[in-house]
Image: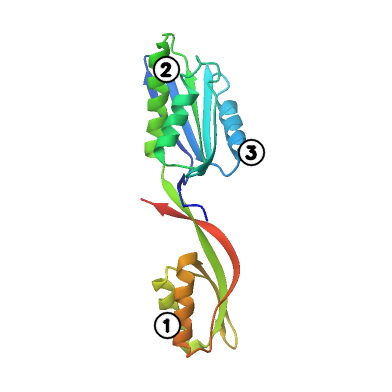
Amino acid sequence: MPSPYLIPSEETRRELIVINSRFIANLAPVASTDEARAFIKRIRAEFPAASHNVPAYILGGGNTVTEYFSDDGEPSGTAGRPALTVLRGSGLGDVVVVVTRYFGGTLLGTGGLVKAYTEATQAVVQAVPRAQRIPVQIAMTAIPYHLFERVKLLTTRQKGAILDETFGADITLTLRFPVESFQGFQTGLRELSAGQVQAEIIETSEMLVPVS
């Protein structure tokens, strides 16, 4: 299983002015090349009169990544690569940024452009909330009524959540746990029920957990 990595939890925008040029950095979470391209297209459509819309993205995380950048008409190496370098240093994966520039009438030079695109990307990277995608297991179990409160406490202790409750002859619960916590819940459930009750995994998926 690949190591978990941080991703943006929502779209974020930051702006700065550099010698009359306006730089607008938009950053978003993306899960595929198609999503990244769609975001880039949307930002270009939002700012059609801009001098440049410079994109960069990283898909995946850790040692398994797909990267892309474009200078979008700026001198080679002065725009997209600095933006990508900031993304690499941020520790974020599954992330796309587009830095929009409105030319302010004063040439910035190659060093000035690198600095401006770097700072614009840094500003939005520093502002974006982060989350981690973790593997989870969805399980179901049917428990007698007298165990309900104790099973709820057990679920909380094992970092789980009750997704659904159905009351009939027994109480049928649908629960979600981080993968590493499920076995602890299963063991606790057997102990509470003297071995009479266990949970059945019905799905394995992922969820986003905010990271402060």
Could you say which disc has been placed on residue 34 in the image? 3
- Report the front residue among 177 and 49: 177
Could you say which disc has been placed on residue 208 in the image? none
Q: Residue at x 42, y 71 (%)?
A: 158
Residue 20 visible here? no
Q: CA distance from mark 2 to mark 1?
A: 61 Å
Tell me which amino acid carries mark 1: Arg
Q: CA distance from mark 3 to mark 1?
A: 46 Å
- Report the front residue among 149 and 189: 189
Q: Is residue 87 above or below residue 160?
A: above
Q: CA distance from mark 2 to mark 3?
A: 28 Å
Q: In front: mark 2 or mark 1?
A: 2
Tell me which amino acid carries mark 2: Leu
Q: Secondary structure at mark 1?
A: helix
Which mark sits nearer the N-terminus, 2 or 1? 2
Q: Secondary structure at mark 2?
A: helix
Q: Residue at x 60, y 66 (%)?
A: 203
Give the residue pinned by disc 1: 150
Give the percent coordinates (x, y) of residue 17. Answer: 38, 20
Give the percent coordinates (x, y) of residue 145. Answer: 50, 87
Farthest residue, direction front:
63
Residue 146 visible here? yes
Give the residue pinned by disc 2: 113
Q: In front: mark 3 or mark 1?
A: 3
Q: Residue at x 40, y 26 (%)?
A: 118
Q: Secondary structure at mark 3?
A: helix
Which mark sits nearer the N-terminus, 2 or 3? 3
Q: Is residue 159 above or below residue 10?
A: below
